[in-house]
Amino acid sequence: MNSLKEFKDSIQSHFEQQLPFVVYNEPESNELIALLQPSTSLHSAKGFKRSGFVFCPFQSGKATVLIPDAVAQELVCQVDEHFFDEQQVDEVIPTSPPIESGYERMVIKAIQKIESGAAKKIVLSRKIEIPVDDTNGLDIVFDTIKAYRDAFTYGFFHPKLGFWIGATPETLIDVTGTTFKTMALAGTQKVREGMNPSWTQKEINEQYFVTQAITEGLQPLVKVIVVSKTKNKQAGNLWHICNDISGTLKNKKELLERVINALHPTPAICGMPEDISKRFILKNEGYDREFYSGYLGRLSPELNARFFVNLRCLKLVDNIANVFVGGGITEDSAPLEEWVETAHKSLTMKRLLLPYSKLQQA
């Protein structure tokens, strides 16, 4: 077990050598974990046959990256409750610049696609570029871990892939033996003190689509599947609608890759039906999502897996933080409302960038 100083110093030294690493903290855990890879090789997680940290892009046809346990040095640091109390994140007033014409046209086009009957939902995203000081990205990583204890928080660096930082509230899948847990997550509202969220019919319908698609995709691979009652789930400064989904797989060892493929990309980050939504995204978004809305997490030697959808994340490129945000478009969507929703979602990472940028308001 490493002290916090030893833990940070080891990662810093590794980073200075421009060698790959990941540092992460699972929701509500007091344990910080890092894997330090000794070379710049790109390892593949294909087939999920080797344990380690998995980092998968949005496009399933692109290679899923692995920091393998077999070659990496693992560091573990136990922290106390005060570690998470240290991070005081300034509350910012959520403002939004005027809607960009390109984004507005894209949303209108998606609504027309849905109204034609070709799709039920299309998830569209955008990238917000925020100038940052010449700062050490590891500072932002640890600020993120401290600020969002209820999320899966991480920093992932590879010289061939860049520096990614995030805090995601959404579990893709949690598998232990043949028992699995996942969730359907949709809808977004800002947390207001003393008030429970009130959901529109558009948001309720969206949640139904997501839940239905996940359960139907898993049905051929499971013995038992159970869907919880719909509930509110808080993630940082945002509310979401959530259904927990759990059950028993028919045979985990042979089915794990098929289960992952059945879930990714989920309707919450792609749309319904998947093939039509994905084609629309790739044709119209105008940029490469890379690892945003992919998934990440640890695969154990026993092939137990806990993977999270890579939401609420950013990529550091030189002195620019690229913040990724998206939202589900349905027939009831309005371009301006979707634009404002993405502005609210961007606060998760923007708030953490305030000390490192000239950004005064989100």
Image: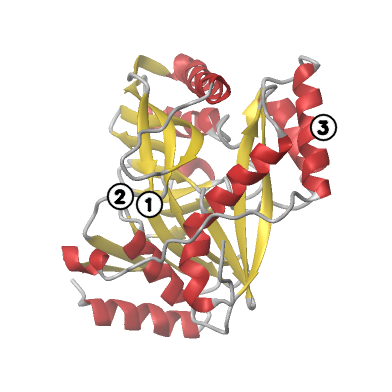
N-terminal of the pair, mark 3 or mark 2, is 2
> As drawn, is 117 to the left or to the right of 35?
right
Q: Which amino acid lies under the numbered mark 2 shown in the image of this protein?
A: Pro
Per the image, label 2 sits on a secondary structure element best described as: loop
Identify the residue shown where x is 58% and y is 23%.
202
Per the image, label 3 sits on a secondary structure element best described as: helix
Identify the residue shown where x is 83% and y is 48%.
101
Q: CA distance from mark 1 to mark 3?
A: 34 Å
> As drawn, is 240 to the left or to the right of 278?
left
> Callout 2 environment at 10 Å: few (<14), some (14 to 19), or many (20+)?
some
N-terminal of the pair, mark 2 or mark 1, is 2
For disc 2, the marked residue is 27
Per the image, label 1 sits on a secondary structure element best described as: strand
For disc 3, the marked residue is 109
For disc 1, the marked residue is 152
Question: Considering only vertical position in the picture, is 261 above or below 146?
Answer: above
Question: Considering only vertical position in the picture, is 356 above or below 234?
Answer: below
Q: CA distance from mark 2 to mark 1?
A: 5 Å
Q: Are marks 1 and 3 in contact (CB under 8 Å)?
A: no
Q: Are marks 2 and 1 in contact (CB under 8 Å)?
A: yes
Nearer to the camera, 307 or 189? 189
Q: Which amino acid lies under the numbered mark 1 shown in the image of this protein?
A: Phe
Nearer to the camera, 207 or 66? 207
**Where does residue 330 sit, x and y in percent of width and height?**
66, 25
**Where does residue 92 sit, x and y in percent of width and height?**
48, 61
Question: Considering only vertical position in the picture, is 59 above or below 291?
Answer: above
The C terminus lies in quadrant: bottom right
Nearer to the camera, 57 or 86? 86
> Callout 3 environment at 10 Å: few (<14), some (14 to 19), or many (20+)?
some
